[in-house]
């Protein structure tokens, strides 16, 4: 298409404005973690690495990180199993209610988190008499992570077709060998991308976590939230925030390297 | 043993299907739908005003309170207004960005641009809203320092701040489906329109916009629904302003049945929205 030079320049500058909109606030977080002023007056007049060393020694942060990783890994493991099972069922079989499944699976992520949160809290504590803790957090997180794995797996299964498996079975391999040598290797990168996204979603989740974690469990987002308005914790919150911003490059790098399906990492 | 089990299952297709479906479907139906259904039932209960315990007696009192009190109507309208504004702002920002990424950028920079747009999705939600607290701080915030010289001042914490914050959070969710839609759009359609004498904006209005409409709808599902239920952004940068989510959150510990009743509002709005989206056929192209 022939786009005039002016239109090109206009679009490029709009892209620039958009990217500035995205990256200026994130850069401010990173710069502020080195801001020597305790009240974070802007622009910073002096810089320090003191907050970083304080944050590394902070036990609350370490504890929260531990809970986040634990909850994220457990929820991802459950989501990987359940999501893959569902994807196999929906892509390889015809059955009554197949369309309902795809709706059922997106529901936990399309309804507001606060609704899911109070519904789960009500069910766990009032109806089942459970106490909230790691288990309830994991159940909550796994529920909305299933769809991520499911979407990634089903896209790959549909593209893969069944001919490779049939060939393997025709050549005498049994079901397990076929799954181990044919299906799983072909599915692996999609499952990795799905698992990565699911972990990311769980790691960052705050609303459902607020309602399913008891007082004993503080995941990283809950820790940030609880310390956001405490003035003497602000420097450490800044460091944690800056770390999370920098770390967000890792999954992007990994998913771009490993998932050839889509450039967008399978979220769309 | 495992092999004989797998051989046994291989011959029985239906059994295999049942084995695949049972656990995940039970999980979603029991843990999720069950909890939602219980919440819906709770919406029809009341609480004992002395003990604060839930009285399991079916009545419509909560719905009556909700519909007669003008304060709740205002919250619903405000929340809808915010969700719609966020969706519009995200679309206006996303279309030119996605267009440049999909149609003008060279393949190499295309990949980098997609990564640049995706990265903030992985940065923590709270961190991003926290960043806007620093940006919007009236008086000594970054926005005043940055744009003050050209006469633009921070709106402070309140409704506009919520709209900015939510647009910021959900912008990538709008850019990516539009980018994907534009990438699928063949260039020769745009060439043809240009050859037939249409200028850029006319081509955009008559050719591009109708064709990427499903992508816009797909993006709006995120921007609209995520804004509709949010309460944390309002807590951090909304000043005293309340959204539907805040009302649910506040009632949760003092009057669960009423919180459940209010929670039905965003759920119904989303159900209606999903129904309308289904009719446009945009879901199929997601």
Image (cartoon, coloured by chain):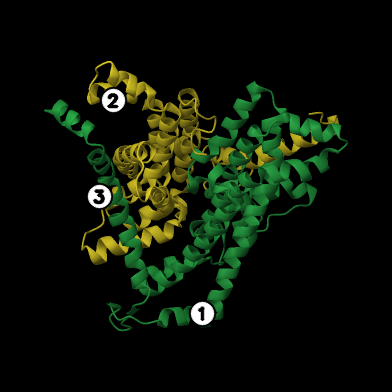
Q: Left of B193 or right of it: where is B76?
A: left
SS state under label 3: helix
Q: 10 Å neighbourhood of mark 1: few (<14), some, or many (≥20)?
A: few
Name the residue furthest right. Answer: B197
Q: In which quadrant is the N terminus of chain A drawn?
A: top right
Q: Using the rendered image, report if marks 2 and 1 lie on a common chain.
A: no
Q: CA distance from mark 3 to mark 1?
A: 38 Å
Q: CA distance from mark 2 to mark 1?
A: 56 Å
Which chain appears green?
A: B
Which of marks 3 and 2 precedes in the sequence? 3
Q: Chain of mark 3?
A: A
Q: Can residue B133 be seen at all in this image of the molecule?
A: no
Mark 2 or mark 3, whichever is nearer to me: 2
Question: Mark 3 = which residue?
Answer: A135
The label on residue B67 is 1
SS state under label 1: helix
Q: 10 Å neighbourhood of mark 3: few (<14), some, or many (≥20)?
A: some
Q: 10 Å neighbourhood of mark 2: few (<14), some, or many (≥20)?
A: some
SS state under label 2: helix
> Residue A268: x percent and y percent?
52, 39
> Residue A159: x percent and y percent?
45, 29
Which chain appears yellow?
A: A
Q: Residue at the location (70% across, 27% down)?
A: B105
The label on residue A179 is 2
Q: Residue at the location (72% across, 40% down)?
A: B96
* Residue B83 vs residue B237, the one in the foreground: B83
Q: Residue at the location (57% across, 58% down)?
A: B276
Residue B194 falls in which quadrant of the image? top right
Q: Chain of mark 2?
A: A
């Amino acid at each position: 298409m022939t786009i005039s030079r002016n239109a090109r320049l206009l679009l490029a500058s709009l892209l620039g404005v958009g990217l500035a909109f995205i990256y200026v606030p994130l850069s401010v977080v990173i710069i502020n973690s080195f801001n020597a002023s305790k009240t974070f007056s802007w622009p910073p007049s002096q810089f320090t690495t003191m907050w970083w060393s304080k944050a590394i020694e902070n036990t609350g942060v370490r504890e929260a990180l531990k809970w986040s990783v634990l909850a994220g890994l457990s929820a991802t493991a459950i989501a990987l199993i359940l999501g893959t099972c569902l994807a196999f069922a929906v892509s390889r079989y015809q059955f009554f209610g197949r369309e309902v499944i795809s709706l059922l699976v997106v529901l936990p992520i399309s309804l507001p988190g606060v609704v899911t949160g109070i519904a789960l809290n009500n069910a766990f504590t009032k109806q089942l008499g459970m106490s909230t803790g790691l288990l309830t957090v994991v159940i909550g997180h796994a529920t909305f992570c299933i769809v991520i794995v499911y979407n990634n797996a089903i896209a790959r299964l549909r593209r893969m077709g069944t001919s490779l498996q049939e060939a393997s079975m025709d050549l005498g391999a049994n079901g397990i060998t076929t799954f181990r040598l044919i299906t799983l290797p072909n599915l692996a990168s999609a499952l990795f991308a799905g698992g990565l996204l699911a972990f990311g979603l769980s790691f960052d989740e705050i609303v459902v976590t607020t309602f399913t974690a008891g007082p004993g469990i503080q995941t990283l987002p809950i820790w940030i939230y609880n310390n956001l308005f405490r003035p003497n914790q602000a420097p450490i919150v800044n460091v944690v925030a800056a770390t999370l911003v920098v770390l967000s490059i890792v999954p992007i790098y990994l998913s771009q390297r490993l998932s050839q399906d889509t450039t967008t990492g399978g979220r769309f | 043993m495992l092999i004989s089990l797998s051989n046994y299952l291989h011959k029985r297709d239906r059994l295999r299907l049942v084995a695949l479906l049972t656990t995940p479907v039970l999980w979603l139906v029991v843990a999720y739908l069950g909890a939602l259904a219980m919440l819906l039932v709770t919406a029809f209960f009341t609480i004992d005003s002395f003990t604060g315990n839930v009285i399991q007696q079916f009545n419509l009192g909560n719905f009556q309170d909700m519909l007669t009190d003008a304060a709740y109507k205002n919250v619903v309208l405000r929340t809808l207004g915010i969700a719609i504004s966020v969706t519009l702002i995200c679309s206006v920002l996303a279309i030119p960005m996605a267009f440049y990424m999909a149609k003008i950028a060279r393949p190499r920079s295309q990949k980098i641009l997609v990564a640049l747009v995706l990265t903030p999705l992985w940065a923590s939600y709270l961190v991003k809203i926290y960043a806007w607290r620093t940006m919007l701080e009236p008086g000594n915030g970054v926005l005043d320092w940055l744009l003050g010289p050209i006469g633009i001042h921070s709106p402070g914490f309140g409704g506009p701040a919520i709209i900015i914050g939510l647009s910021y959070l959900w912008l990538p969710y709008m850019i990516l489906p539009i980018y994907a839609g534009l990438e699928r759009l063949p260039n020769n359609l745009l060439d043809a329109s240009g050859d037939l004498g249409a200028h850029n904006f006319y081509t955009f209005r008559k050719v591009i916009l109708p064709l990427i409409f499903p992508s816009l709808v797909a993006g709006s599902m995120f921007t609209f629904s995520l804004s509709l239920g949010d309460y944390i952004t309002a807590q951090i940068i909304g000043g005293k302003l309340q959204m539907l989510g805040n009302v649910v959150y506040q009632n949760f510990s003092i009057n669960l049945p009423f919180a459940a009743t209010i929670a039905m509002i965003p759920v119904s709005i989303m159900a209606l929205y999903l129904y309308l989206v289904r009719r446009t056929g945009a879901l199929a192209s997601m």
